[in-house]
Image (cartoon, coloured by chain):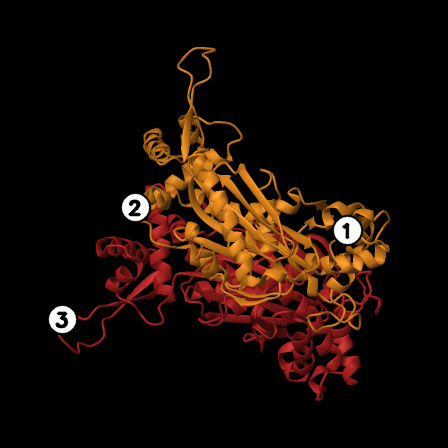
Chain colours: A orange, B red
Amino acid sequence: MWHCQEVPGRLIAPVRQSGVRAHNLALVLQTVAKSPAPISRAAVAGSTGLTRATVSALVDDLVAGDLLIELDPAPRTGAGRPAAGLALAPHGPAALGCEINVDYLAACVMDLTGAVRHRLVEHADLPAAGARGAIAALGRLAARARTLAEADGLIPAGAALAVPGLVTADGQVRVAPNLGWQDVDARALLRSTPALADLPITVDNEANLAALGELHAEPDAPDSFVYVSGEIGIGAGIVLDGTLYRGVRGWSGEIGHITVHPHGRPCRCGARGCLEQYAGLEAILREAGVPALERVAAPLPGAGGALGLALAAAVNLLDVDVIVLGGLYAPLLPWLRGGIEAELHARVLTAELAPVTLRPALLGGDAAMRGAADLVIRAVRDDPAAWLALT
Amino acid sequence: MWHCQEVPGRLIAPVRQSGVRAHNLALVLQTVAKSPAPISRAAVAGSTGLTRATVSALVDDLVAGDLLIELDPAPRTGAGRPAAGLALAPHGPAALGCEINVDYLAACVMDLTGAVRHRLVEHADLPAAGARGAIAALGRLAARARTLAEADGLIPAGAALAVPGLVTADGQVRVAPNLGWQDVDARALLRSTPALADLPITVDNEANLAALGELHAEPDAPDSFVYVSGEIGIGAGIVLDGTLYRGVRGWSGEIGHITVHPHGRPCRCGARGCLEQYAGLEAILREAGVPALERVAAPLPGAGGALGLALAAAVNLLDVDVIVLGGLYAPLLPWLRGGIEAELHARVLTAELAPVTLRPALLGGDAAMRGAADLVIRAVRDDPAAWLALT
């Protein structure tokens, strides 16, 4: 008996022979990627349902294209020829993951296995540098990262840049309030760095990319969660069913401007009572009565309660049961947890039926940079045929 | 040059020859379904990229399986043989779309073209009937609908039921507060109706299915929107990128319990200041000072403002730019619009960059029942190979 299940019509595309090969290349590569240990050709065939001959032909192409490696067989322990193990290639395509934030620039090199091979961070006053100055400085850092990657024998496959602002699908930053940017064509400016001119470049929101970084930070990450990034401003990245949800224009996750007190404090966005006014960096320092976050040493019921109220709205709307707290919230979680949980318990309709888990981000300040690199690496892993056609 | 684009890994499945045929059957059927007028085999080939011979073989199977019809060629007007046009079959599979609400039961018959062929509505006091009584009565109504469908020569493909409550993926209603239901196995109870025992049965939340109904109500419906269903309670259905987003447990869209006043009126859910207390049926009658909705004849700034505040949270989180107001909100929209728009304008961070459109639901009270039927029809359209294997 078949089942009623909605399948989005947009995913339907014609399958031709070349499409079958591309699809199956991706299937084999992802099967190896998901395997916790090197996996034999026979095991790939068993797990994918493809014939051994088909798998072998596909594997040969993936090895030749520097996407897979074949590890030596383990020493012979029993009867029969021991099988060689397949693994993702650590010497093939690599990603440049970059971030511009208020007080630092960062760039990393990630290989196809997801390992960060190089990590460069530069502290600077980026609002003072202006958009052109900041992007030029990031371009220099990314060029250094590329040189390091190439010295390792890696082939740069693309660059992605995280920015704390509203970014359009074509890489324009409409507004980045804490950087003081408005209508900056970040992609074009970054491409004007000669060392990056030949690479595909993507620009996306910092919280979106940090959420993607967290999604890929561990193999058993939850499929659906809200990542909340606390800094001077507050943003969120929404992962639904294993996919980052960007919204119609890529502007989803503006949780910092959810109203927590309708007649409350004025916000720089023009509204009143936004979450940012109760749980942003300045509000937390004010509530704690200390000059620096490191000195917070007592519960923060005000900030926690405000976060809980806004997160209850997110959970009521989205039915997600994991909330990942990143940025400054990760180290403060012990002081925020009580306030957040009290509000979630009181205000989430399904709280009694399904508890919500709060946890600190795994990647700390590197989440957005790593998520940016992940975006590039996943694009290669999801469409190896396109990569093979290029190399 | 290839592009960085995230593709959800879960969609990767092996493609074998039978998989290619199933995929291409769906492609051809959907191409015909999307065409605003009957479309020739040659045009299907042109639009899908499949060869004419492949299209013809697939079309023959779809015609034999009562999924497509071939209309007579139009009268000859020029040189050459005029092409026959393909259209969805109005005589093949059909869906039973059903709804149980507080004061009515409804069932409809929808054919593959999406046309509602029969519509049965029965008014009753369903909370008084209890869950078993209500579902038995709905079963009798659905059985009558099936008889009408079969008298038309239609073949029932499945039934789907909309319920105003929290429904699990396997058709259990955990809570339906306005019906007084708790932990009701609605799917099993409905299947115990002998006339429905042989059909796949799906149960889902009323606002979810109403959103799906609206999505399919017109060919150029937006891809992403929030549907808000106002009744005694308030629910929402979230459509993202053309797909209904159900949440981890199918419990998304509980907008009625978003907090609009943190210390406000107590809600029957146990929290304070929920939207439902300011914009549900009772609050609206109180604000308007009239005994029935038909007599509302002046702006409702309280209900509109509360709705605007909760919807601003949804837009800030989801970056959707269309809000569809259904249930009692559709006829009241002229009186609610001012309050909603003022809050959206003040509180949506991107309001200046991208306006939000408010519009009344197209389907009125039939939205959930039609969305239920749509769910079944789309399942056939999305996997015609499964249907052909059954017939």
Q: Amino acid at mark 2?
A: Ser
Q: Is residue A345 above or below residue B307?
A: above
Give the residue type at disc 3. Answer: Gly
Residue at 77 percent of width and 48 percent of height: A332
Chain at tag 1: A
Q: Nearer the viewer, residue B294 or A95?
A: A95
Which disc number belongs to residue A352? 1
Give the left or right position of residue B84, taking residue A372 as reference.
Answer: left
Task: Nearest to the eye among marks 1 and 2: give it.
Answer: 2
Q: Spatial distance from mark 3 to mark 1, Cα to Cα?
A: 70 Å
Q: x, y (%) of residue B167?
A: 65, 55
Which is more toward the observer, A62 or A117?
A: A117
Query: Vertically, is A277 above or below B304?
Result: above
Towards the viewer: A380 or A338: A380
The residue pinned by badge 3 equals B80
Q: Which residue is mark 2?
A: A18
